[in-house]
Every structure is written in structure tokens, then in C-alpha cells.
Image: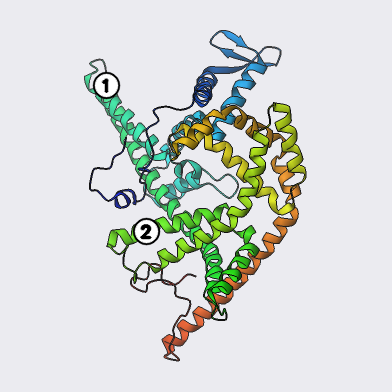
């Protein structure tokens, strides 16, 4: 159900770090075919969590559900069903939280003897948590979305044990003291783990800034063409911009699209918090990002329409064998530049079932249509994995990947040249030579948050 009260600003309420999407609908009804798929996936996940693999006396392995033997083929089929459902998004991966809960328990045990505050113990603590370049330590756990939930779970468990101990008349005072000391130590370790997670997040943010610079350079190149004074008319500028975006298409990948959405949301939130969203003097960068996004979407849409047409030709075939054979022929005829985008489109269509099941699909009519096509879309997901696996993608897209690599190198070189030029301009300004102006400023110049895109 909607959390929005009448008269509240929807964007203002939603735009803060960690905010949940407020346009997500409560899932009240989905197509029977999709509902069956979700129920089957949940049932398979429940079964997989109860199945135990045991080694027999002859060295072979068998699967057991309680005391009953489960045929190996059936157990593997259940596992495959869960993996496919998780990949599509029909269910959450039941193994991730279990694995991370076990990792946290092991980590707490490892850190019991280095939870102090002297230099050696602190170094040993970080060595275990962060690890080295090979092992990676427990970085994945500390950066996981489940980490805070698992910490709260451990704290709640400690609280429950303390409560049980306080009412347990059989425990001696010495045993209670030992238990209290153990819980105090665990709380200390959890506090230090949260501090370590904060440091890791800062490091991740710093690494993200380098990636952001590359995406900003792509935006800069698009803006430079659009603002070129050599274009006599708006039509000439539009043609030049279209040609530029078309040439940059391999760089307009999923990372770039995601960055555009992120940058627009961040800038929109910043303007909303300061009340500048409607101020044309303050929202220029936000407007530039939206214009770039629309232009990129328009260019990519031409290719995407072609890819989606091919996919829906496949889905309209009547039999499983016809659908698979047509998909095989389409894949064999794909040019190098289209291999990765085509696979991405297919993956997105398959994953749309998960969005419909979670109530994240805005158009109810389209959601109903997607639900009715559940079985053929599920087959599409299985067939694309078989006919276009990662190794075949790498082979068929080798030429396009090399071209994209050269383009990225050019962008990095241009980035370095621009940084050098900006550095010289700053040095001149400090020495009082020239005006020291930085001509590539596309921000609003008001607070320095988005002033210079390095």
C-alpha cells in the first residue's frame, strides 16, 4: 500500500539514501501461470534447504530428505530450478543469507583473540577482516546488504541469552559472569566490524569516483558536440549529435545507463533538499543530464526495438523446438557489435517476470501479458543460457570488445590531458597569471558539489 499521505511531496519523501521505492505496488494478483512459477520456485527453495548430501561407505554421495533417499537427478533438478528462479528474480537466493550468517559466526570466533585496542591486535583484526589480494578476507560480508540485519540478529540473540540467564536459577554467579564477559566481547567485535565496514564503504566510494570520471567524460563528449558553435542550424547540431552518439554506442553500456539514472536521482535529491528544483539558475546540470539521457535512450532504442522484435518472433512460435531453433539461427547471424546487447535484452525480458511478481511493473496491462507468457519466457531464459553462454559471447563479440577497448583508451587519454590543463590553469591562478578560469565548468557554480567534472 502507498505510504504517501495527501499533500506530501512524493519526490522529497523518496529521495534520500536507502529510501525504498514508493511506487512499488502491493502484489494482490498476478497471472495464474506466473503465480504457479513463483509457488514452484518457493517450494523448490524450501525442499533444497531441507535436503542433505551424505557420503556413503562406498565413497559415493547420496541426497536425503529426512531419512528418505532422494534420487540424484531429482535433487539436481530442484537445485537447477532454484538457481534459475533466483537469476530471474522470482525469489531471493535462500543460500546467500544462510552463508553470510555462517560467515559472521566464523568471523566472530576468529576475532575473539584480537579484539583489543593495542597496535598488534588492531593490525591482526584488520588482517583477518580485509584479507589480502588473493583471499579478500570478509569484505563481501561487510559490504553485503544483509550485514546490518545479521548484526542486529546477533545483538538480539545476545539480549535473549542475557534475559534467559537472568531468570535461570541453576546458573552460578561465576557462569553468569563468564556469559556476560563473552557477550561484552562479542558486542565489542560487532562495533569494530561496523567501523571496518564504514572504512570499506569509503574505499569503495573512492574507487567509484574514478569510474565516475570516465562516465562524466562520455557525457562531456556528448555535450561538446551539442554546444559546438560551428553548427549553423539546430538541425545540423542534431545530426552531428546523433552521429556522435551512434559512434559511441559501445561505450553506452549498462554501467553508463545506470550512472545516468544515479546521477539524475542524486542531483534531483540535492536540489529538492535545498528547494532549487524549479530554479533555472541552479538546476542546469540536472537538465543537462536529463537531455543526455533522453538522447542516449533514443539512440539505443533504435537497436533495442530491433532486438525486441527478434525476441518476440521467437516467443510467438508455437512449439518449444521451433522457438529454440529460431533463437539459434538469430544468434548465429548476430554481428559482433550486437552480441552483448542482444543477450542483455533477452536477460532483461526474462528478468521482467521477477519485476511483475514483485509488483514493480507499472503498467498492469503489460504485467498481465507478461504473466500469460510465463512459460515461454522461462524457456527463453533456459535456451539463451545454452545457446549463448559466456564463452560464446566472448568469442563472437571479440571485434566489438577490441573496438570498445580502444575507445575507452582514447577517453582516458583525453581525461589525462584535461586534468593536466586544469592543473596548469589552477597553478596560473595561484601565481596570479591570466584569469585562471576553468572553461569546462558545467555546474551551477554555487556550492562546488558539481562544479568541475574531472
Could you say which disc has been placed on residue 164 in the image? 1
Q: Is residue 178 left or right of residue 229?
A: left
> Image quadrant of residue 116?
top left
> Image quadrant of residue 452?
bottom left
Indicate the position of residue 347 as horizontal and vertical percent values: 60, 40
Indicate the position of residue 246 as horizontal and vertical percent values: 63, 62
Closest to the observer: 265 or 237? Answer: 237
Q: Is residue 205 left or right of residue 17?
A: right
Camera-nearest label, 1 or 2: 2
Residue projecting furthest to the bottom: 433
Count all numbered tags in the image, as a single digit: 2
Residue 35 vs 128, above or below: the answer is above
Q: Quadrant of the N terminus?
A: top left
Report if the CB atoms under discs 1 and 2 are less than 8 Å apart: no
- Name the N-terminal-most of marks 1 and 2: 1
> Image quadrant of residue 84?
top right
**Colour pattern:** rainbow
Q: Secondary structure at mark 2?
A: helix
Instruction: Report if residue 280 is visible in the image.
Output: yes
Q: How far apart in space, not on screen, are marks 1 and 2 (Cα)?
A: 50 Å
Closest to the observer: 373 or 428? Answer: 373
Residue 151 vs 118, above or below: the answer is above
Amino acid at each position: 500500500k502507498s505510504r504517501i499521505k495527501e499533500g506530501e511531496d512524493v519526490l522529497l519523501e523518496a529521495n534520500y539514501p536507502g529510501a525504498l521505492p514508493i511506487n512499488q505496488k502491493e502484489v494482490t494478483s498476478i497471472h495464474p501461470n506466473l503465480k504457479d512459477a513463483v509457488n514452484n520456485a518457493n517450494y523448490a527453495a524450501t525442499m533444497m534447504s531441507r535436503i542433505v548430501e551424505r557420503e556413503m561407505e562406498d565413497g559415493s554421495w547420496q541426497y536425503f530428505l529426512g531419512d528418505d533417499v532422494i534420487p540424484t537427478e531429482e535433487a539436481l533438478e530442484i537445485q537447477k530450478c532454484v538457481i534459475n528462479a533466483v537469476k530471474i528474480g522470482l525469489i531471493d537466493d535462500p543460500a546467500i543469507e544462510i552463508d553470510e550468517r555462517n560467515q559472521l559466526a566464523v568471523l566472530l570466533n576468529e576475532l575473539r583473540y584480537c579484539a583489543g585496542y593495542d597496535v598488534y591486535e588492531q593490525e591482526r583484526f584488520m588482517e583477518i577482516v580485509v584479507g589480502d589480494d588473493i583471499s579478500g578476507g570478509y569484505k563481501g560480508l561487510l559490504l553485503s546488504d544483509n550485514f546490518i540485519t545479521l548484526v542486529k540478529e546477533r545483538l538480539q540473540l545476545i539480549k535473549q541469552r542475557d534475559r534467559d540467564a537472568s531468570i535461570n536459577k541453576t546458573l552460578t554467579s561465576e557462569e553468569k559472569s563468564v556469559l556476560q564477559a563473552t557477550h561484552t566481547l562479542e558486542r565489542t567485535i560487532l562495533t569494530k566490524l561496523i567501523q571496518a565496514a564504514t572504512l570499506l564503504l569509503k574505499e569503495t566510494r573512492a574507487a567509484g569516483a574514478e569510474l565516475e570520471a570516465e562516465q562524466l567524460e562520455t557525457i562531456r563528449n556528448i555535450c561538446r558536440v551539442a554546444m559546438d558553435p560551428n553548427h549553423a542550424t539546430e538541425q545540423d547540431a542534431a545530426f552531428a549529435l546523433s552521429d556522435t552518439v551512434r559512434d559511441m554506442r559501445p561505450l553506452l553500456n549498462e554501467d553508463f545507463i545506470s550512472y545516468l539514472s544515479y546521477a539524475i536521482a542524486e542531483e534531483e535529491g540535492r536540489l529538492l533538499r535545498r528547494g532549487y528544483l524549479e530554479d533555472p539558475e541552479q538546476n542546469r546540470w540536472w537538465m543537462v543530464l536529463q537531455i543526455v539521457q533522453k538522447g542516449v535512450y533514443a539512440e539505443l532504442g533504435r537497436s533495442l526495438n530491433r532486438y525486441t522484435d527478434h525476441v518476440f518472433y521467437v516467443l510467438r512460435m508455437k512449439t518449444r523446438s521451433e522457438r529454440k531453433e529460431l533463437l539459434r539461427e538469430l544468434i548465429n547471424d548476430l554481428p559482433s557489435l550486437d552480441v552483448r546487447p542482444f543477450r542483455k535484452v533477452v536477460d532483461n525480458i526474462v528478468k521482467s517476470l521477477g519485476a511483475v511478481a514483485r509488483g514493480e511493473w507499472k503498467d498492469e496491462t503489460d504485467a498481465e501479458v507478461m504473466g500469460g507468457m510465463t512459460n515461454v519466457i522461462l524457456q527463453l531464459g533456459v535456451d539463451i543460457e545454452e545457446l549463448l553462454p559466456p564463452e560464446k559471447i566472448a568469442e563472437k563479440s571479440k571485434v566489438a570488445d577490441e573496438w570498445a577497448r580502444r575507445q575507452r583508451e582514447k577517453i582516458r587519454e583525453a581525461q589525462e590531458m584535461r586534468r593536466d590543463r586544469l592543473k596548469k590553469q589552477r597553478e596560473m591562478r595561484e601565481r596570479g597569471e591570466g584569469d585562471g578560469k576553468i572553461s569546462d565548468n558545467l555546474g551551477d557554480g554555487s556550492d562546488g558539489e558539481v562544479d568541475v567534472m574531472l
